[in-house]
Amino acid sequence: MRIVVPGRVETHILSGMTERMHFEHNIVGGDFTRAGYASSQVKKALKTLDVDMAIIKRTVVATYEAEVNVVAHACNGMMIVDIDGSTIQVVIQDEGPGIEDVEQAMVEGFSTASSEVREMGFGAGMGLSNMKKNADSLHIESEPGKGTKVEILMALDGREEVRSKK
Amino acid sequence: MKVKEIVRILDARILCGEDMQEYTVEKAFASDLMSDVLMLADDNVLLITGLVNMQTIRTAEMSDILCVVLARNKKASREMIDLARDGGIILIECRYSVYQTCGLLYREGLKPIF
Amino acid sequence: MTVGDIVQALELTVYCGKKGLERRVTGGYVSDLLSDVMGHADTGQVWVTLQTHKNVMAIASLKDLAAVILVTGHKPDENTAHQSEEEAIPVLGTHMSAFDVTGKLYELINK
Ligand SMILES: Nc1ncnc2c1ncn2[C@@H]1O[C@H](COP(=O)(O)OP(=O)(O)OP(=O)(O)O)[C@@H](O)[C@H]1O
Ligand SMILES: [Mg+2]
């Protein structure tokens, strides 16, 4: 079966076997009208696969926070989604300023958001802790001056433990 | 509280989801910061906000929030309404401030999340 | 009604700015967008928000607001506390959410 994800030219289905899905989306830094498009596609895809609603919500809240972070804090990014029978892996990577101190950034309330970003409804410094709360596993790698890579892993079978498949 | 009661209490305008007015929200939450909204784990939540942009709708979509009241007499754009309709979200515009909107709905018995 | 009356009725924590508890309250304003508060809040209103950073006090003072209520357990940062004392505008706190505390505030003011 080939699963076609509704979407625009950014959507590439690279493999489409049963219960296996791979797709990628561009994320444009600074473009708040488009932020959330990639996560919306993830939500639609997970619905077609009949994934549990609670898992869908936790997944897309985490990916959306990561997507908005690229829009708010970085220049250009990419969301790469892999779904197989047991796990959802979402990697959000960007070219941007990176995060100087990831541990500090994870603290609830810490934010370097500009006043423009605050007026868009973001910048409370809650995104990363929210991602941590919702993801079964969260990995953040960041190189100051270069960019950031966020990996979100979700177990489909209710297991909370998932291992990074790097 | 049913959506149609909310519309009556706030003397508000439904922008999309007119056919879902029998839908019942259990609790309300008021915020203009979307990460604050994205923290919620509850179902059947009414979101009251003065933030009126595409991310308001995206946030509702991701959090499974089915009813959003846009306060402060702000006008939703055509793109916002289309996105809300696409996501099965009931979008309501009202002329009151967030303060008054909360006050009126609370007085009529709508419960807070916490 | 004064800020002190509201503190008592809603069991709020007074973090700082005690000198301002005698301020008269005319109403409330609920917003987390600073420019919105700049544009639309009125003198004597109590501002309900979860924003804690230092610009909050600058705006409260410019708009001559009666007090700031921080919701869901948020606490003022050091800078905010300092300015609150200087301006004699109390910063109050509650564990209630914005909808909850606003509902109660509205009932109190419109009794
Ligand atoms: N992709 C990124 N690139 C550069 N910096 C980032 C990135 N993601 C997060 N950060 C940094 O980490 C901080 C905390 O991020 P977090 O998502 O928790 O809060 P926020 O985005 O500032 O506000 P909120 O998510 O509540 O809207 C940001 O303010 C920013 O300094
Ligand atoms: Mg964020």
Image (spheres, coloured by chain):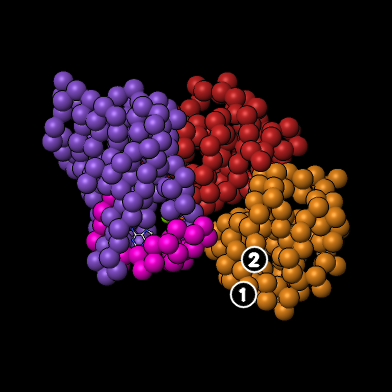
Chain colours: A purple, B red, C orange
Q: Is residue C12 magenta?
A: no
Q: Nearer the viewer, residue A122 or B48?
A: A122
Q: In the image, what residue occupies the spot 67% across and 58% down?
A: C70
The spot of residue A74 in percent (x, y) is 31, 61
Q: Amino acid at mark 2?
A: Pro
Chain for numbered disc 1: C
Residue under circle 1?
Answer: C79
- Left-right relation of A160 to B49: left
Q: Amino acid at mark 1?
A: Asn
Check whether the beta carbons of the residues at disc 1 and disc 2 lie within 8 A of each other: no
Q: In the image, what residue occupies the spot 60% across and 63% down?
A: C52
Q: In the image, what residue occupies the spot 15% across and 28% down?
A: A16
- Residue C67 vs B26, above or below: the answer is below
Near mark 1 (Cα within 10 A), the count class, few <14, some 14-19 or many ≥20, is few
Label 1 – label 2 distance at C-alpha: 8 Å
Picture disc at residue C71: none
The spot of residue C69 in percent (x, y) is 70, 58
Q: Which residues are magenta?
A: A92-118
- Residue A157 vs B100, above or below: the answer is above
Q: Is residue C68 visible?
A: yes
Q: Is residue B15 visible?
A: no
| Disc 2 secondary structure class | loop
Q: Is residue A95 magenta?
A: yes
| Disc 1 secondary structure class | helix
- Residue A124 vs B25, above or below: the answer is below
Picture disc at residue C76: 2
